[in-house]
Amino acid sequence: MIITIINEKGGVGKTTTAINLSYCIADRGHKTLLIDADPQGSVLRWQGISNHKVFDVKPYPEPITSLIKKLTCGYQHTVIDTPPGINDTSWATLLACHLAVIPVTPSPFDVWASSDIIEL
């Protein structure tokens, strides 16, 4: 299963959600891949300071559209941390995923800002 963590807004917890979800899936014994598709590379930095290697982490490739299936081969579950906004990368991950998770903070503005992604 491919799960995309996506939101137009930054700072809503996409990376934290992606890391925690990947950990929970891997902790249940499933071979899990976390793709860091955000150019900020927060997941890769987190992996560099973490003492626990429970799941694999790969940086985002360009162009991601043609490589998602190749990267996910051999994994039971793949979680993709996307950059903020709707761009080619996030759109490609939406097309490839089985499930999209849209984290939001508890404020009306953040919920409103997510409406464009929900409409996709």
Image: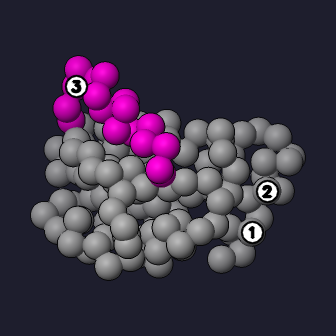
Q: Which residue is mark 3?
A: 52
Question: How far across and how far down the image is residue 70, in percent?
Answer: 21, 72
Going 86% across and 46% down the picture, which residue do you hit? Answer: 108
Q: Quadrant of residue 14?
A: top right
Considering depth in this image, is 112 or 9 the residue closer to the camera? 9
Element type at mark 3: loop
Query: With 113 as the anchor, is 58 left or right in this view?
Result: left
Q: Amino acid at mark 1?
A: Asp
Which label belongs to residue 76?
none
Going 19% across and 32% down the picture, which residue do you hit? Answer: 53
Q: Which residue is mark 2?
A: 113
User: Residue lying farthest left?
Assistant: 74
Q: Which residues are magenta?
A: 38-54
Question: How far across and how far down the image is residue 85, in percent?
Answer: 65, 60
Dot 3 or dot 1: first in sequence order is: 3
Question: How far across and how far down the image is residue 71, in percent?
Answer: 23, 65
Q: Decide if residue 5 is in sight here.
A: no
Question: How far across and how far down the image is residue 102, in percent?
Answer: 60, 55
Label 3: few (<14), some (14–19) or many (≥20) C-alpha neighbours in 10 Å: few
Which label belongs to residue 116?
1
Vertical placement of residue 93 versus 59, above or below: below
Going 78% across and 52% down the picture, which residue do you hit? Answer: 111
Label 1: few (<14), some (14–19) or many (≥20) C-alpha neighbours in 10 Å: few
Q: Do tag 3 and tag 2 residues touch (Cβ < 8 Å)?
A: no
